[in-house]
Image (tube, rainbow, N blue to C red):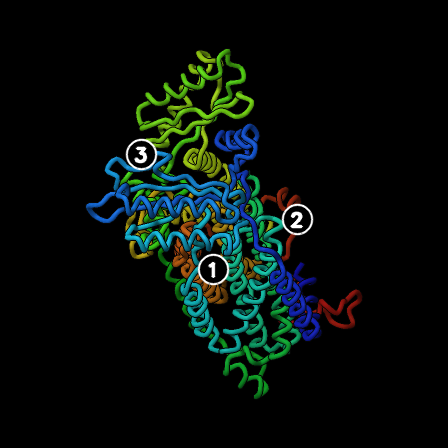
Amino acid sequence: MATFLYRMGRVAFRRRWLVVILWAVLLGAVGAGAAKAPASGDEGTSFMPGIEAQKAFDLIEERFPGSDADGATARIVFIAPEGEKVTAAGHRAAVETLVEEAADEPRVAGAVSPFQAGAVSKDASTAYATVTYDVAASDLTDADKSGLERLIDEARDSGLTVETGGTALATQPAAGGPGEAIGIGLAAVVLLVTFGSLAAAGLPLLTAVVGVGISMCAILALGSTFGLSMTTGTLASMLGLAVGIDYALLVVSRYREERAGGHEPREAAGLAVGKAGSAVVFAGLTVVIALAGLSVVGVPMLTKMGLCAAGAVVLAVLVALTLVPALLGMWPDAVLSRRVRRRAAGGPAGRAAHPGGNAGSRWARFVLRRPVAVLLVCVAGLGVLALPAADLEMGMPGDEAKPVSSTERRAYDALAEGFGAGFNGPLTVVTDVGGAADPEAAAATIAERLKGTDGVVSVSPPRFNAEGDTALFSAVPATGPSDSTTKDLVQTIRDERPGLESETGATFEVTGSTAMNIDIARSLQDALVPYLMVIVVLSLVLLMVVFRSVLVPVKAAVGFLLSVLASLGAVVAVFQWGWGAGLLGVEQAGPVMSLMPIFLVGIVFGLAMDYEVFLVARMREAYVHGERPAQAVVTGFRHSARVVAAAAVIMIAVFSGFIGAGESMIKTIGFGLAVAVLFDAFVVRMAFVPAVLALLGHRAWWLPRWLDKVLPHVDIEGAGLTREPVPAEEPGARPQERVRT
């Protein structure tokens, strides 16, 4: 592989204008497609096939055709001024006027007055009206919404406080806000400090932006076809930007190293892509496998997020292998430090020795002198940080998790205060009475029994479909949607099913947004540990192939587990327990977003393998060339520690920029990834790894002979490019073997 990549780097360097033009044409083509593409749809109604809440939802759509189960709704909440009531003549007239005129708006299927539906609180301080549309929220245009928005403003002029909930008028949060720009700015500063050259700092940023631009335009262009949401695109841009900078950074850093070693520009570009590019390909492959593996969880939304992010990573790899050497060909000396440029102008090709080493080698020697102490500190520290992960609770936070500045959050709070905490998360019960002798009596019995269940505040009268074989009613719990008591209540209701089925001859299922979120959280929590184990086994196999060792992959897997558990513990402490939540703009602590932990595991696995390859590959390269184990560790740190540290700081900066996102899932993932990179790069790879290798010595690189024969050989270190040149007169010599190092 290294030889193939070496040739690719030389071709890209030589045909630089062609390569740049091809990438520019691709960017322009997908950009034009994104500009002409229709707005993307929603994520689809089938969120997680197989769970009870989803099957019940599908049954409602089947038995109640035309009920617009997926149609948009707007819940308009009216709050009277302090000491007044919404039933007062003036306030009542304003509410009824809004409802009557809203019913005549385009795409509105119906509008129900709170005074007709009994949707007025006991103290008459709060009321709500429901406006339903005949299309999904994603199909509503600004013109469709403007009429209702105008009516709401007029109602506010009457003295009422009016807030809105539901899907029809939901505001779309900003993807990252100014934090994204701050993250990119910090990345630029880190690159400038690392390379000491504006050109070297700007090139990885430029190429990463090109890769993210193409991937985002592709997502926008295909959004309406595949139902790709803003969340999907944001995560792809987050990961694409981070790995795009890192992969380009690795290639540019190796190019500078080869130029400092005396190679002419084209040869240095080929060697950089052949050696560093091998690590980039493997690192990118591990990230893609981990992200694509999310599809086995069975959540369509998670599958889309994983595949889109994987596509962004593939683009980042291709950009690093082709566009980066092409741009190096345009400005071969611009990325070099002044010292190297002066030396190149003066003629000497060699590089001065550095007997004292750099900061990376000094740190490695520090760890090698006291490996046991360093190892204990790492394990103990990460272990303590991981403790909160044992209390992980997963859910799907709704409007209660939004900032109080949003009208959805204020509507949620007003309804909870006026009608009870459980009003915002009613349970929908669909009853199949086709097998009952008396369908109406069976439905009434089930409704009455559920009404007497502890934790249920009220149950609506059953509503039958046209055929009379299915009844639908809602049960309002006493606690909020994200409360653990509500989760227990759903299970209690389902546990009553066998007895009610034998008594009435009818069966029922529980659904609604609350039950759906509970079922999704339970399924994902059950899938988390098996997925984590699959990832660990995968890492063992991949690293065994790369490093020809048994213990190095085991060490890497243990380090990955430590970093991912510590990052999950930090997420639980902040977003679930509320420690320091206000500093991150989290106004309501609660269950961790259901999709977040399993997505975090997949991404952290890929990033952890990145750092493992970047760092340990240079150690193995030194070891196979005859250095003793301890010296090989020092050599690996001398060459790679600065690059790995810079790459980690860049990723932390980029991920931290998404903590300012309005979308709670993006905020949580941004924080989780930032702390995971911090733990994995600076604790596990920089301290845990050298300490373990120091204790293992030669045993770290042991591999049974039979396993060595079975495993495929992958030239990740570019050994095929670093061997001694073959003399021209020796038979069988090939031009690509005459590579000097």
Residue that appears at 47% across and 51% down: 604
Label 3 SS: loop
Residue 310 image offset from top left, x and y in percent: 57, 53
Label 2 SS: loop
The nearer-to-camera label among 2 and 1 is 2
* Kind of residue indicated by mark 1: Val
* Kind of residue indicated by mark 3: Thr
Between 414 and 682, the one nearer to me in the picture: 414
Quadrant containing the N terminus is: bottom right
The label on residue 479 is 3
Residue 725 figure quarter: bottom right
Residue 105 image offset from top left, x and y in percent: 48, 49
Q: Earlier in the sequence, mark 3 or mark 2?
A: 3
Between 30 and 38, the one nearer to me in the picture: 38
The residue that label 2 is drawn on is 712
Q: Earlier in the sequence, mark 2 or mark 1?
A: 1
Q: Within 10 Å of the Cα at label 3, are there few (<14), some (14-19), or many (20+) other Cα atoms?
A: many
Look at the picture and state if 262 lies above or below 558: below
Q: CA distance from mark 3 to mark 2?
A: 57 Å
Q: Tell whether 414 sits left or right of 11.
A: left
The label on residue 633 is 1
